[in-house]
Image (cartoon, helix red, strand yellow):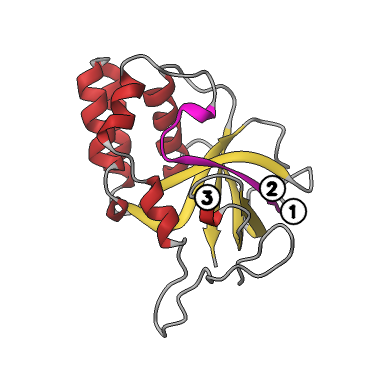
C-alpha cells in the first residue's frame, strides 16, 4: 500500500506503520483533524446547518473507485470517522435518543461526546452515505482506492488503498451513518446506502 499524490509522485509519509505487529491505519493528521471541537459543534447546533454533506463536521471529500461495486470508475463522496465496533451501537443509540428529544443542547453534548476524541473511532475505517444508483448490485468488499480531496492541507491528493463495500439497512455502520445525517442535517436521509472504506 502506498500514499500517492494525484500527480503520481510518492507522498513523504506512508499509510501503514512499518513496525511489526501494527495494523494499517489512517494518517494520524487525518484522525486528529476529524476530531471536532466545541466551537464547530456550537455553530452547527445554533441552526447554521446546510442541506448537503458539507455540513457534517469531521467529514472530507474523496474520489474513490472500485470496479466490482461502483457503476462508474470514479465517484465523489464525503467520508468521515466511524466508531470502533465495540462502541458503535452505543453511539448510534445516543444519537437516536438526541434526535428524538430535539433539544439542541442534548444534541450538541451527544455529538461532542462522540466526536471530540479520535480514540472513539476505528483508525482504519471511514464511511459515508451514497445516493442510490452510485453503486452496483453487489455488496461484497472489493479492492479500491480513495484520494483525499479535503481534510488537512498536507494530505490533500494522498491516495489510500484498501477495500470498499456498500452497506444497507441492518448493518451497524449504515445505521450509525443514518443517525449522524439526522443529527447534523435535522432531517431523515433519502434512499442512500452506506459506503465503507477500510485501509489494508
Percent of width and height locating residue 138: 69, 47
Q: For the residue labelled by badge 1, is the local secondary structure a helix, a strand or a loop?
A: loop
The span from disc 1 to disc 2 (Cα, nearest Å) is 7 Å
Residue 185: where, in percent of width, then height? 44, 21
State left or right for residue 175 relative to residue 75. left
Q: Earlier in the sequence, mark 1 or mark 2?
A: 1
Magenta segment: does it hold 10? no
Q: Tell me the quarter of the image containing the N terminus.
A: bottom right
Residue at x-position 78% and y-position 43%: 71
Find disc 1 in the rendering and name its residue.
68
Residue 138 image label: 2
Name of the residue lying farthest toward the right: 72
User: Looking at this view, is 64 or 83 the one in front?
Assistant: 64
Q: Which residues are magenta?
A: 53-68
The residue that label 3 is drawn on is: 153
Question: Visible in this render: residue 173?
Answer: yes
C-alpha separation, residue under disc 3 versus residue under disc 2: 34 Å
Left or right: 29, with 7 as reference point: left
Question: How far is mark 3 from mark 1, CA to CA?
Answer: 31 Å
Q: Residue at x 55, y 68 (%)?
A: 200
Tell which tag, 1 or 2, sits nearer the viewer.
1
Check the image and report above or below for 44 versus 70. Answer: above
Q: Are marks 1 and 2 in contact (CB under 8 Å)?
A: yes
Most extreme residue toward the front, as rendered? 154
Q: Is residue 171 visible?
A: no
> Is 157 in front, or is 1?
157
Mark 3 or mark 2, which is nearer to you? Answer: 3
Residue name at image x 48 percent, y 50 percent: 152
Q: Which label's residue is closer to the chain start, 3 or 1?
A: 1
Label 2: few (<14), some (14–19) or many (≥20) C-alpha neighbours in 10 Å: few
Find numbered disc 3 in the image and state the secondary structure of the residue it sits on: helix
- Residue at 40% across, 61% down: 28
Amino acid at each position: 500500500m502506498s500514499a500517492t499524490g494525484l500527480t503520481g509522485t510518492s507522498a513523504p509519509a506512508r499509510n501503514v506503520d512499518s513496525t511489526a505487529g501494527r495494523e494499517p491505519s489512517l494518517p494520524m493528521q487525518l484522525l486528529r483533524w476529524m476530531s471536532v471541537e466545541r466551537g464547530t459543534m456550537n455553530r452547527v447546533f445554533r441552526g447554521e446547518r446546510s442541506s448537503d454533506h458539507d455540513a457534517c463536521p469531521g467529514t472530507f471529500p474523496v474520489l474513490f473507485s472500485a470496479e466490482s461495486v461502483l457503476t462508474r470508475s470514479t465517484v465523489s463522496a464525503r467520508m468521515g470517522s466511524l466508531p470502533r465496533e465495540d462502541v458503535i451501537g452505543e453511539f448510534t443509540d445516543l444519537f437516536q435518543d438526541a434526535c428524538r428529544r430535539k433539544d439542541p443542547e442534548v444534541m450538541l453534548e451527544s455529538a461532542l461526546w462522540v466526536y471530540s476524541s479520535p480514540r472513539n473511532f476505528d483508525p482504519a475505517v471511514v464511511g459515508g452515505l451514497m445516493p442510490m444508483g452510485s453503486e452496483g448490485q453487489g455488496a461484497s468488499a472489493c479492492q479500491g482506492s480513495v484520494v483525499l480531496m479535503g481534510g488537512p492541507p498536507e494530505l490533500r491528493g494522498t491516495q489510500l488503498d484498501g477495500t470498499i463495500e456498500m452497506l444497507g439497512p441492518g448493518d451497524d455502520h449504515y445505521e450509525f451513518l443514518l443517525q449522524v445525517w439526522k443529527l447534523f442535517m435535522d432531517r431523515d436521509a433519502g434512499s442512500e446506502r452506506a459506503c465503507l472504506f477500510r485501509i489494508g
